[in-house]
Image: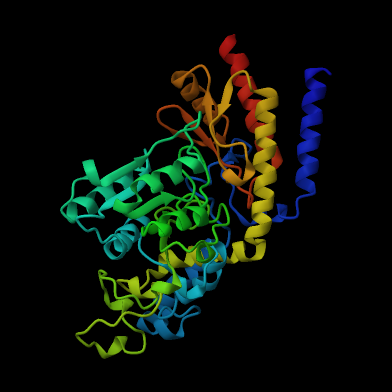
Amino acid sequence: MKTEDNLKSLEADALARDAADALASFRSEFHIPPHGDGEQVYLCGNSLGLQPRATRQALIDELDDWRDLAVEAHFRGKHPWMPYHNEVREHLAEVVGAQPAEVVAMNSLTVNLHLMMASFYRPTRERNAILIEKNPFPSDRYAIESQIRFHGFDPATALIELDADEPNGTISDAAIERAIGEHGARIALVLLPGVQYRTGQVFDLKAITQLAHAKGCVVGFDLAHSAGNVPVNLHDSGCDFAVWCSYKYLNSGPGAVAGCFVHERHARTDRPRFAGWWGHDQSTRFKMGPDFLPTPGADGWQLSNPPILALAPLRVSLEIFHRAGMSRLREKSIALTGYLEALIRMHLSDMIDIATPREPQRRGCQLSLRVKAGRDAGRALFDYLGERGIVGDWREPDTIRIAPTPLYNGHIDCLRLVQATRDWAVHAKS
């Protein structure tokens, strides 16, 4: 088949797949950034999700209530501010597979991580270690090391790093089991990602939790790249806590309010915590008493009253997730990422390696790509794609992260990426 005929055939197939997509209409609910006379091919929801069209009006509504009602908007606003965080609770619980009382939207991810470790990392002389993956997202490492030092221990001995044992930098289930089996007696906390940010590998939260709990370890997860990407079923996993941001797959804007999960068995825990007024029991909060009585559930870890202008975009996005449904989004994600993988292996295997696991259950939206010719060639490809309105993101030393997001990406976006990469290869050889 001639190249031109092949191209037309591929495009027809991609467009037909998109026409048959039951979730395709959700794309129209987002602003797709412009490029030239058209739109970007935006494949970067793993770094910053696109803006829902309804977000602007949601923010204007809150500004109008502030203008017209001032303090009375706490009680008489279109979405009263006093109980505002309850407006996101049900749909947030749906997204992360939790009971409503187990989740709360508050703070930023790393603040929530510190708050959780203040309660759930309680080291002793015999059991003071934290198990993490080697080369986690830097913010996690900084927070974890600082907590170890805060308690008077040395990260050189109290930080156990789980090294990759698979060819593309991923970690096998067997390696996790070995590490917990070997070090479990001295591990106070197992703290792993739901999805590893660089490779895109999905971890089995329930299996890890069972292994760690059997050794007496507390278990927490960073779901920065999981929430809104893959079903995590936090309640059923049995983990003790989890934290996440909402500016990636949850489309809530740069620096958006983050989320936190605390399993129901800790709803009335006597574990120490850093307390704040908004975490006090709601029935007596306004009596302004001197003694802190935490609200049962995740709400009890709140510090301050909720940031309304930050919660409004999250409310809008979660309503979209509620209508789309995580199960349907996951089904489309598997199909979409599988389609992109097949195109790459068919048309780009001579120049591109895929670091992300091949098994659908071990990955989410993201494929992590490496150019075989090395770092400089990879960076050149990344820049070439950007100039042509195809947006992924770059992670040193040599990884291009591409995330076809099911709420607003389609098969044609994946094909455009592959076509542009082939064009770059031809251009680079000429």
Residue at (44% x, 67% y) in the render: 311
Q: Nearer the viewer, residue 369 or 407?
A: 369
Give how far across and how far down residue 174 sits, in percent. 49, 41
With respect to residue 346, does 156 lie above or below?
below
With respect to residue 240, does 350 lie above or below?
above
Label count reads: 0
Q: Nearer the viewer, residue 208 or 203?
A: 208
Q: Nearer the viewer, residue 114 or 28?
A: 114
Residue at (70% x, 44% y) in the render: 335
Residue at (19% x, 85% y) in the render: 290
Give how far across and how far down residue 254 sits, in percent. 42, 52
Give how far across and how far down residue 233 sits, in percent. 55, 61
Give the quadrant of the C terminus: top right
Q: In screen coordinates, is 208 left or right of 423?
A: left
Find residue 112 and report its image quarter: bottom left
Give how far across and how far down residue 305 sits, in percent. 34, 74
Q: In screen coordinates, is 180 left or right of 22?
A: left
Snapshot colouring: rainbow
With respect to residue 106, does 48 lie above or below?
above
Residue at (63% x, 31% y) in the render: 417
Q: Looking at the image, can residue 4 be seen?
A: yes
Find residue 39 and report its image quarter: top right
Q: Looking at the image, can residue 257 be seen?
A: no
Q: Residue furthest left?
A: 152
Give the quadrant of the N terminus: top right
Q: In screen coordinates, is 232 left or right of 350?
A: left
With respect to residue 87, does 45 lie above or below?
above
